[in-house]
Image: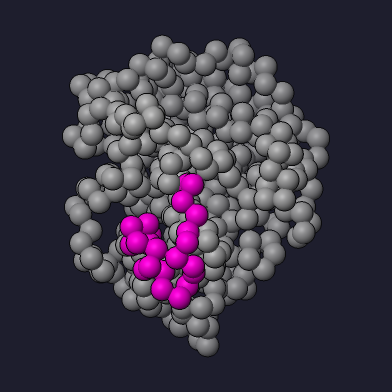
């Protein structure tokens, strides 16, 4: 099914939430002011409950069968790379856990120091994503069991539970967001397929829930409470809520969908993202990088959130606006300067959401962006997105650019505000 224009398919706010939204949003602008923390907490999302704790963010078994049968050379190449050059479990288990208080310098003021401090964090994210990907590619439970053992080591050490936070120095808090959803999403891929490690799985799930709870207890400053960092927290909350059958945590994840739809302008812009000046386009896209996986997790629980409409907006409008400003910055109008930062356009990690959305709706309009980048990989928000989502009929081969391969200019793992 392809999305054709504004509201080609939609549903209105369900009756069980309409009254709450009217009361909550009364007097709050729908185009310029984000929902406050208090207003989000007042949303009645009681009908959202975890229905299937074994559901990942994609159909794992179905995809594994497809990958074993496909003759798509792009998918076959990535499958073989992950199978033949898969990680050594023993080496991964030797990676030290992080138990000291985590403190990270800011990216923009001190990029070199940030790179050094975040290297072990990215190593963690790559490890969990790689083990999940190797399991999907090979169908070998060895990698699934290794991932459980790897996360259990961190759980037994109470890793990542101590971190420094101050509103003026939030980088450790920011960095943990991606570590948590990387672990949760990778674990969601493997845990139903692992037998005989019940104690380990119980510890891992308890640790993930505690880690999320500790992290979520911090509300954030004026912007990070409600912008893309809220969506990042909502992503891990949605996934861990499912994994641990924690309805309240799952609802926190779902609340990001309602918050984003409320905040959205009529054109589909996220005001807190496009106010970022020359990085307005980057941050509109960046918000979708987390909102779309939340949508997928929620859909997998049986809720048709892609059809959800609030104040005339659906998530399709945000996608439409992102594509419009990617193609022509003039579409930003008075929201931001025309001279937009474009370095992220050569970095595949930022477009994992397009693989997800494109697979669900049969979209071809992303091809010019994603075809030269495939196989798309994001160490946290989607993992091996092309391997997990791309229709084999969409693209058969790697697209080689004039330089022999795409050159990444944007910085891998960017998680600063």
Q: Tell me if residue 340 is in the magenta stretch.
A: yes
Residue 372: image x %, image y %?
A: 33, 36
Q: Is residue 315 left or right of residue 88?
A: left
Location of residue 311 with respect to 167 vertically, above or below: below
Residue 161 visible from this viewpoint: no
Q: Is residue 326 left or right of residue 380?
A: left
Residue 270: image x %, image y %?
A: 47, 67
Residue 277: image quadrant is bottom right
Q: Can you say which quadrant of the picture contains the C terminus?
A: bottom right
Residue 369 visible from this viewpoint: yes
Residue 332: image quadrant is bottom left
Judging from the image, the colouring scheme is one colour
Location of residue 22 with respect to 257 vertically, above or below: below
Residue 135: image x %, image y %?
A: 42, 22
Residue 279: image x %, image y %?
A: 52, 58
Q: Residue at x 47, y 59 (%)?
A: 340
Q: Residue at x 35, y 61 (%)?
A: 328
Location of residue 165 with respect to 33 vertically, above or below: above
Q: How many numbered discs, if any?
A: 0
Q: Where does the magenta region start and end? A: 322-344
Q: Which of these two is toward me, 169 or 156? A: 169
């Amino acid at each position: 099914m392809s999305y054709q224009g504004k509201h080609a398919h939609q549903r209105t706010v369900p009756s069980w939430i309409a009254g709450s939204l009217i009361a909550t949003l009364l007097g709050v602008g729908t185009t310029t002011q984000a929902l406050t923390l208090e207003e989000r907490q007042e949303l009645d999302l009681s009908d959202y409950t975890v229905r299937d704790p074994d559901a990942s963010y994609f159909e794992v078994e179905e995809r594994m069968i497809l990958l074993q049968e496909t003759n798509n050379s792009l998918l076959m190449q990535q499958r073989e790379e992950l199978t033949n050059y898969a990680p050594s479990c023993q080496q991964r288990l030797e990676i030290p856990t992080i138990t000291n208080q985590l403190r990270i310098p800011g990216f923009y003021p001190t990029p070199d120091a940030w790179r050094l401090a975040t290297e072990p964090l990215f190593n963690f994210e790559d490890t969990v994503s790689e083990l999940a990907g190797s399991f999907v590619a090979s169908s070998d439970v060895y990698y699934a069991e290794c991932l459980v053992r790897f996360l259990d080591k961190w759980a037994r050490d109470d890793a990542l539970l101590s971190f420094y936070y101050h509103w003026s120095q939030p980088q450790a808090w920011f960095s943990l967001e991606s570590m948590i959803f990387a672990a949760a999403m990778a674990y969601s891929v493997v845990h139903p397929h692992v037998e005989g490690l019940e104690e380990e799985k119980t510890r891992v799930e308890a640790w993930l829930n505690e880690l999320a709870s500790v992290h979520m207890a911090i509300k954030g400053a004026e912007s990070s409470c409600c912008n893309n960092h809220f969506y990042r927290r909502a992503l891990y909350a949605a996934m861990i809520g499912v994994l641990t059958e924690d309805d309240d945590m799952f609802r926190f994840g779902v609340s990001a969908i309602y918050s984003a739809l409320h905040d959205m302008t009529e054109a589909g812009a996220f005001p807190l993202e496009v106010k970022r000046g020359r990085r307005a386009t980057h941050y509109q896209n960046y918000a979708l990088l987390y909102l779309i996986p939340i949508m997928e997790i929620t859909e997998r629980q049986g809720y048709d959130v892609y059809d959800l409409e609030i104040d005339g907006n659906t998530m399709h409008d945000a996608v439409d606006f992102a594509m419009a400003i990617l193609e022509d910055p003039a579409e930003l109008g008075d929201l931001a300067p025309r001279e937009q930062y474009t370095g992220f356009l050569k970095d595949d990690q930022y477009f994992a959401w397009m693989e997800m959305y494109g697979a669900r709706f049969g979209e071809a309009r992303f091809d010019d962006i994603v075809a030269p980048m495939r196989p798309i990989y994001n160490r946290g928000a989607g993992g091996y997105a092309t391997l997990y989502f791309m229709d084999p009929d969409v693209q058969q081969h790697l697209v080689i650019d004039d330089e022999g391969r795409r050159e990444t200019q944007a910085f891998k793992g960017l998680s600063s505000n």
